[in-house]
Image (cartoon, grey):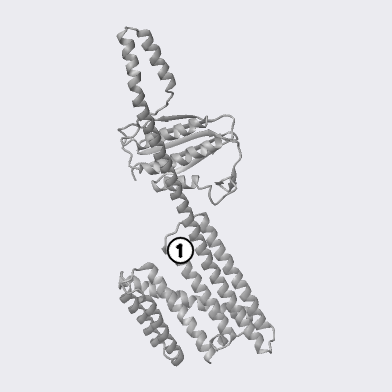
Amino acid sequence: MIKWYLIESLVNFLQVFVIFKVFELNYDRRFTFRYSVEVAILAMTTILCILNYNVAIESSPFIYLSYILLIYIFSVCIFKGNIFSKVVTTFLLIAILGICELLAAVFITSISGLDLKLHQEQNFLRFEGMVISQTLFIYVYMFMRKKVNKEKLNLLNNRYYLLVGLILFLTVAIMVMVIWMYGNIKIENESVNNNLVILTLCVSLISIITIALTNRIIKDMDEKHKNDLELQHMKMEHTYFSDVNSVLEEIRILRHDMRGELAIIHGYNEMNQRDKIRIHIEKKLSEMDIQLLPQIDKDNIITSFLNFKLKEASSKNIDIQIQSSLSEENEIYIDKEDICRILNNIINNAIEACMECEEKYIKLSIDMLGSCIIIKSENPYTGKLNKEGDKILTVKKDKTRHGYGLKSIKNIAEKYGGFIKLNYDDKVFIVEVQMLTKI
């Protein structure tokens, strides 16, 4: 008797815990007291245990309806939000719980061949029903938690749901075998029943813990990805500012040398030696082989960044051609840092591809078409791509530190209602990004 009282207490706690945690997903707490929800869970669990121990639901169903009403009152007191929506939430949670218990009972009796009435008695059949129904209830809660957090159903999360479904299937399959053994094989030794109980409970716990750990691992991977992107951005800024400081230093030196050059030109001019002035100026111009872009944005952020990447490509003997129809008059409402991130990823990938080719060039264009900005890049490559379906993966060995370039571009483009388009053959790789300047 004590054993069953403990089992039912744990089941009651689990049910109340899931119910209030679902409320916590949808509503903010009303009180500053940190453990208000936990106190409510313990209080409602205690009340439910007392009811189960003293009152049968068949004889006094209104008492249990009053208990459900009490859950609703606690939810109104603890959580902010529309009180009518809490009625719907309470009803749906109780309905889901009842459906899980009904499915478990019908499932077990159909597999074992035993009478459904035995499910109401304190036996192994009822325990199996508790384990299966509560496992299903927890899986429903995990799914609701994912949906409420509004996590994108990208490839990674699709794999997560596939894994959740697979683990649930294996859990149910093992329980089916245990139930079949219980209903179709004569078991005279009571210790065998106890072992079956322990096996069933362990399978359920392992299933739930596995999903919880998987969820934690995926969150850690997402955080690592965000940290890698932030680190890449910091490195890009550091390189940019270092280059700016280098240019400023060159300007200081040039300004210092300019005095001497002007003195020489002034001397030639005083002696009326115009040919020597022309020869001297042409010589200096040939020495200053500097390619700079015209200013294409008002605050000079994109222009400065492209000049920096132009110099980086030139240092690696890569011919980079940049064309742009943008001018200072164009109003660009997209964050300039996001545009620079896209350009940085595109040009970096193009430079890496060019380093493995004999022909080294990058053709980059930035244009405006109505309220849409179009960035297009073309570069040669070896023709080798690592693909998984429609997704292009990095060919580098360290997959944890590389392969985020195209994904980052895609995320930024979608942020501004745009998209990324890839075209390639055996020799040429083309990336096109389109974004709306006004959303």
Q: Quadrant of residue 285?
A: top left
Q: Which residue shows up at 56% across the image and 65% down it?
A: 165
Q: Quadrant of residue 65?
A: bottom left
Percent x, y of residue 429: 54, 36
- Count the numbered circles shown: 1
Does 438 appear above or below 8?
above
Which element is circle 1 on? helix
**Disc 1 marks which amino acid?**
Lys
Q: Quadrant of residue 83?
A: bottom left
Q: Nearer the viewer, residue 365 or 271?
A: 271
Q: Nearer the viewer, residue 243 or 33?
A: 243
Does 112 appear above or below 337?
below
Q: Nearer the viewer, residue 263 or 331?
A: 263
Percent x, y of residue 239: 43, 40
Q: Which residue is mark 1?
A: 146
Farthest-out residue, top = 272
Q: Which residue shows up at 65% across the image and 87% down it?
A: 191
Q: Is residue 293 left or right of residue 206?
A: left
Percent x, y of residue 164: 55, 65
Q: Is residue 36 left or right of residue 137?
A: left
Percent x, y of residue 97: 47, 76
Q: Is residue 81 left or right of residue 134?
A: left
Q: Which residue shows up at 37% across the image and 72% down it?
A: 88
User: Is residue 433 visible in the rendered structure shown here?
Assistant: no
User: Is residue 64 visible in the rendered structure shown here?
Assistant: yes
- Determine crowd level at label 1: few under 14, some 14-19, many 20+ residues with C-alpha closer than 10 A: some
Q: Which residue shows up at 44% across the image and 74% down it?
A: 18
Does 200 appear above or below 227?
below
